[in-house]
Image (cartoon, coloured by chain):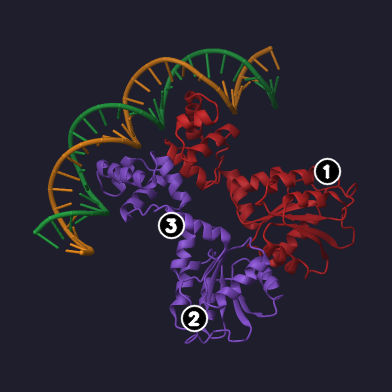
Chain colours: A purple, B red, C orange, D green
Amino acid sequence: MTDAPYTGSPAAPEGGRIRLLLADDHPVVRAGLRAVLETEPDFEVVADVPTAEEAVALAARPGVDVVLMDLQFAGEMRGPQATAEITARDGAPRVLVLTTYDTDADILAAIEAGATGYLLKDAPPEELAAAVRTAAAGKSALAPAVALRLMDRMRTPAAALSRRETEVLQLVADGLSNAQISKRLFLSQATVKSHLVHIYTKLGVDSRTSAVAAATAQGIVRR
Amino acid sequence: MTDAPYTGSPAAPEGGRIRLLLADDHPVVRAGLRAVLETEPDFEVVADVPTAEEAVALAARPGVDVVLMDLQFAGEMRGPQATAEITARDGAPRVLVLTTYDTDADILAAIEAGATGYLLKDAPPEELAAAVRTAAAGKSALAPAVALRLMDRMRTPAAALSRRETEVLQLVADGLSNAQISKRLFLSQATVKSHLVHIYTKLGVDSRTSAVAAATAQGIVRR
DNA sequence: TCAGGCATCAACCGAAAGATTGACCGTTCC
DNA sequence: GGAACGGTCAATCTTTCGGTTGATGCCTGA
């Protein structure tokens, strides 16, 4: 959120071209990003890689100013983890997350991991180029749709379920009954019900199915 | 499924280059497809459009052999509908669906709409090119992952919920109670329950939450 | 034409889930 | 040390859901 100082960043694009690293497991998307970004005279795509691991490895070497990173990868490492590893180092390049989805959980995970910006893949080329320049300058770049979502999130104090509550809710989402959940977690049914009551209150719903619907919409539980 | 006769197809690529129309609402993906496909000497990209409506309009004119179509569009018309409208005409180009998702519902919808093939966006360029040539020849082209899913589908007699049952189940997944569903669909609660019982039987479950879990796992309902 | 699937509805009953109230025991943090 | 919170449990009561049986009308296909 704070503007970066000009010192201590060996990858800063001082006057030169902005050097880009593309990380996406879709060959078509990599080719598209290359095609779109290489038309900009002040950009230089130094590499494109299909895995998060390769992105981390390449970003560690000097000579990269901005990493454009997908969040979803077919392999082991995911985008947020890769983002965190890249940004943890001194003088690290900026990471610009570029993904299809705009769910709250994804956005927050990316920002917490240290991403400088968050863009959606349906962005027009001009918006993309502008965001890259913004990120290269160390300023945060959010797609309008993403910014809106974050504002919404701030306005509504949001869920904030406890770990245990999330655990119970996940099992509910998996289709388990209270009795099954109590056995699975070595609890009494009373406790499970107690958790559920708190969950309903926090999510502003009044049934297990609507709790699951609300929680999946907010990215609290998987699938 | 049947091989096309060589007659009556004004768009047949008799000896000439295969003429392509790209339809995807992501500028980056359009650029990527162009970049990837234009390197093939026997391909010619005649146009790329961001909406399903434009795809239908352009596909109606002669001079297109294969349409590469996304399923998801931001606007009104969706991919399956556009596919159906394109393939309904005599001498229509082949439609090759190219999408990110491989859920059963999407695949079946596309195939029912008359798509000649179904590819995933993570396909390598060679596979993409091969599928385009296969489709241009009038043969069906399925990505390996998609083919596997279809085989699975055939092996397990599977859900096969009726339209009404799917509709009810979708509302259950959205968190509605039986009373709310009955109002929304102008039914009695008895009917809703009746549908649910049939759904439980078909899915092999015994509660609404587990039905939703099973259905999302099989791609019968969204989210 | 008739079986069978689909969609619709009714009435009933037991079981599960939800609401309410109250309680105890650890933490964590001022 | 005490307040606040999270996690645990019990008892009771009401509502909803799930299971069953049975019935009607409409198609479609053998």
* Residue that label 3 marks: A154
Q: Rounded to the nearest whole Å, what is the CA distance between mark 2 and mark 3?
A: 29 Å
Q: Is residue A107 visible?
A: yes
Which chain hosts label 2? A
Residue B89 — which label? Answer: 1
Q: Rounded to the nearest whole Å, what is the CA distance between mark 1 and mark 3?
A: 51 Å
User: Given contact means CB atoms under 8 Å apart, are the residues at marks 1 and 3 in contact?
Assistant: no
| In the rendered image, residues at marks 1 and 2 fall on the same chain | no
Looking at this view, is B179 or B202 the one in front?
A: B179
- Amino acid bearing label 1: Arg
- Secondary structure category for the residue under label 3: helix
Which chain hosts label 1? B
User: From the viewer's perspective, is A122 left or right of B175?
Assistant: right
- Nearer the observer, disc 1 or disc 3? 3
User: From the viewer's perspective, is A139 left or right of C26?
Assistant: right
User: Given contact means CB atoms under 8 Å apart, are the residues at marks 2 and 3 in contact?
Assistant: no
